[in-house]
Amino acid sequence: MSVPAFVIFTDATLQAIAEAEPSNEAGLLAIVGIGQSKLQRYGSAVRLLLDGGSAEDALAASQAAVANTP
């Protein structure tokens, strides 16, 4: 996937993620700009990054999620 982060999440949403540091799906869904679709596609990657995972692992997680999303 080769799109900039702001295409997926707005700056305001990225700021809210950084401030809230959600640890689960419910926490991500509580953030404005994240709905079921973005949660399914990018939720695991966001949580992985928040847990200290690498960008490479997050990219792999999001690619797998997108491949499995109808």
Image (cartoon, helix red, strand yellow):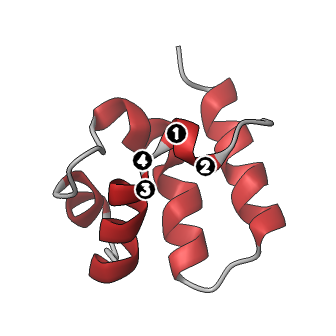
Residue in the foreground of this view, choosing between 64 and 42: 42
Type of the residue with mark 1:
Ile
The residue indicated by pointer 2 is 5
Residue positioned 61% across, 38% down in the render:
65
In this picture, is 54 found above or below 52? above
Do the residues bearing badges 2 and 1 touch, measured as CB atoms within 8 Å? yes
Q: Find the distance from the CA under tag 4 to the CA under tag 2.
A: 8 Å
Between marks 3 and 2 in the image, the one whose residue lies nearer the viewer: 3
Residue positioned 39% across, 44% down in the render:
39
Q: Earlier in the sequence, mark 3 or mark 2?
A: 2
The residue indicated by pointer 4 is 10
Between marks 1 and 4 in the image, the one whose residue lies nearer the viewer: 4
Residue positioned 63% across, 30% down in the render:
66
* Residue 7 placement: quadrant: top right
Q: Which mark is residue 11?
A: 3
Specify the quadrant that holds the N terminus: top right
Q: Secondary structure at mark 3?
A: helix
The residue indicated by pointer 1 is 8
In this picture, is 13 found above or below 38? below
Type of the residue with mark 3:
Asp
* Residue 6 placement: quadrant: top right
Where residue 38 sits in the image (x, y, percent)?
A: 41, 38
Tell me if mark 3 has few (under 14), some (14-19) or many (20+) residues whose alpha carbon lies within 10 angstroms of its own. Answer: few
Between marks 1 and 3 in the image, the one whose residue lies nearer the viewer: 3
Residue in the foreground of this view, choosing between 60 and 20: 20
Do the residues bearing badges 3 and 2 touch, measured as CB atoms within 8 Å? no
